[in-house]
Image (cartoon, coloured by chain):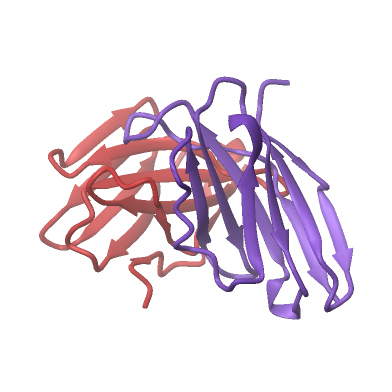
Chain colours: A purple, B red
Amino acid sequence: GAGVSQSPSNKVTEKGKDVELRCDPISGHTALYWYRQSLGQGLEFLIYFQGNSAPDKSGLPSDRFSAERTGGSVSTLTIQRTQQEDSAVYLCASSKETGNNSPLHFGNGTRLTVT
Amino acid sequence: DQQVKQNSPSLSVQEGRISILNCDYTNSMFDYFLWYKKYPAEGPTFLISISSIKDKNEDGRFTVFLNKSAKHLSLHIVPSQPGDSAVYFCAATQGGSEKLVFGKGTKLTVNP
């Protein structure tokens, strides 16, 4: 499969626990994005990585959220001390290059439920 | 403050007829607009886009119209097919920014 792969597909965690969500982008795609979709809402931008540049973290909702991208490929989104309002579908996307001519290719998402 | 609005949460259309999905935006700096389609339990997939220098872009059964003065765009699907049943998201960006601003989506149901 050549698509964006996310794991796990579902995650249920207790309030206060830390979680890690993983994203494998399409091979050769230099740009990687994290979005989330809360119930009844649109997709909300979280963070963006492009090559070796510093990531754009302007969408992260709090300092409990962090993300890294190792070796320009796999990315991990970490949420510390999870809260119930963190429950959402977390979507990763990659694109071949930046700019308007490179549409985002999304993974199927990780559905996070915080109880 | 929602910058991209899809005011119709759902739309139902008969197979073979036209589906028209609407989207309004408030940020006049947006200069590039996209439509994504999402099936349940899958990520959104890119459908069609339009630059603000154009007022229409067509790709097969899908046409996007942009009215800059009204800050409004619409997606026309004709003829509609049952396989088009999905949630459609409108998205916008400005100045080549990598951050897309999405609407809440419209669920389209095409009835056979």
Residue A96, percent from left and from top: 47, 26
Task: Quadrant for residue B60, please give it.
Answer: top left
Residue A93, percent from left and from top: 57, 41
Residue ID at (70%, 43%)? A108
Residue ID at (37%, 67%)? B5
Task: Quadrant for residue B61, please give it.
Answer: top left
**Towards the viewer: A103 or B67:** A103
**Towards the viewer: B97 or A67:** A67
Q: Is residue A35 left or right of residue A3?
A: left
Q: Is residue A2 left or right of residue B47?
A: right
**Towards the viewer: B65 or A100:** A100
In this rendering, the count of numbered labels is 0
Residue B107, percent from left and from top: 55, 57
Q: Is residue B83 above or below residue B6?
A: above
For residue B11, say whether it is visible.
no
Residue ID at (51%, 67%)? B9
Looking at the rendered image, the quarter that the C terminus of chain B falls into is: top right
Q: Is residue B42 above or below residue A41?
A: above
Residue B33, percent from left and from top: 31, 47
Looking at the rendered image, the quarter that the N terminus of chain B falls into is: bottom left
**Towards the viewer: B27 or B17:** B27
For residue A87, say whether it is visible.
yes
Residue ID at (89%, 74%)? A14
